[in-house]
Amino acid sequence: MQKTLFIAVILTLLSPPIPAATNAPSGQPVLLNRTAAIGPAELAVIVNREDPLSIRIGAYYQKQRAIPEQNMIYITFKPGRGVMPEEEFKTLKAAVDTQTPESIQAYALTWVAPYRVGCMSITTAFAAGFNREYCAQGCKLTRTSPYFNSSSKRPYNDYGIRPTMSIAATDFRSARALIDRGVASDTTFPAGTAYLLQTSDKNRTVRINAERQFQERISPQVKLRLLKKDYLTGKKDILFYFTGLARVPQIATNRYLPGAIADHLTSAGGVLTGSGQMSALRWLEAGATGSYGAVVEPCNFPAKFPVPEIAIARYLSGESLIESYWKSVAMPGQGIFIGEPLAKPFGGFHTTSNGNQLTIYSPTLPSGNYQLYGATNPQGPFTLSATASTLIPSPHQLQFNVNKTYPFYLIKRK
């Protein structure tokens, strides 16, 4: 690496505080509104027919995430190679394109290798098509992603790209555990810690300005810890772990909350097998749900690596793992995204009931006046039950006082 990585805090991107949440007890009412994030209906799963592990991962993921059958895409190629030739990929990509419904906004791959296509990462190649503008030899900038730090919820419709993440594992047990962690994370609003480490490796270390202001703008239940040390050991509350070492020791001694992101911001982390540096796969094997790494040696421009503050802010705002992570990398051409793409720890709505008072929270809930409709079953009919406005200073929270309680609700903005 030839330049020092410097990642500055971007305060305007940070999400509003999120109130502490507990798991809803049995019998709590169900809110049927769908949040604006990529979900199973917009995700296509790509499976290699010649790879038995890819087939098993695809089938299990389809079942656990209720992926529609028309979203399952099957292709055929020789598995196990680290690098796929450009021309072979173009043929496969054409086959994928013909099978992809127009509604699809993102892809999930179901293999570890190949992790690279020519000079590009395989996730960016599937997302945007093979394009040498995303590649570089030596210290050159590459093409930027129009999806970077955008507010888009439909990247294919808006930019013509489908963000891609690999459900990467070398055996089915690891893949199943990864998928299960992602599913288990949904709408849990976990209390955890975001660890950003300034390490002794000056070329890779994470740096951040205005630590106090950053902490004031993230969820009070997600604490920021900016530490001057090389690695963590024995931590039980990791939701984000960004560090910078070619190899990070003791990662298996920590507990990673379901949905956790862990990244060592190093130049060969995306060489998933056979690298002299630590593979990003080690994070998933240790219990993280998402990671990232470069598949070729890049010049250490910050834009080629995730911006932790953006990934954190987007995740806390209710976006899925694939959306948050992809939006944090300005130049993703040389980097591979791995993990469970639909994990949404802060997605959906957190609903609690206390007598006739129903409280609803969502980080994606805009300010305004709302009507609450109740029903005895999810198909309706629905009856207007109450009205409410978002609360100050918690603009993403509604409190309804209802005369009659129902097991199912919908809210509509007036």
Image (cartoon, helix red, strand yellow):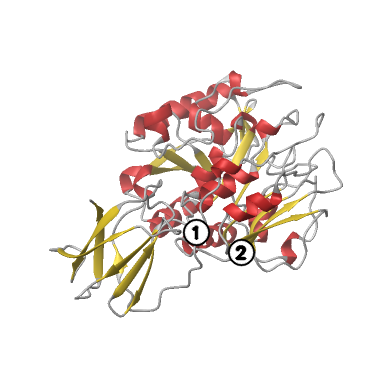
- Is residue 191 shown left or right of residue 4? left
What is the quadrant of residue 195 in the picture?
bottom right
- Label 2: element kind: strand
Q: Residue at left 75%, top 22%?
A: 139
Q: Is residue 237 above or below residue 270?
A: below
* Residue 169 locus on image (x, y percent): 60, 52
- Label 1: element kind: loop
* Residue 254 locus on image (x, y percent): 71, 65
Q: Is residue 206 above or below residue 225?
A: above
Q: Residue at left 53%, top 45%?
A: 324
Q: Residue at left 58%, top 62%?
A: 220
Q: Hey, what amino acid is under mark 1?
A: Pro
Quadrant where the N terminus sits is: top right
Residue indicated by mark 1: 345
Q: Are marks 1 and 2 in contact (CB under 8 Å)?
A: no
Q: Is residue 159 above or below residue 37?
A: above
- Is residue 275 shown left or right of residue 85? right
Residue closer to the observer: 110 or 300: 300
Q: Residue furthest right?
A: 200
Q: Hey, what amino acid is under mark 2?
A: Gly
Residue indicated by mark 2: 192
Of marks 1 and 2, the one in the foreground? 2
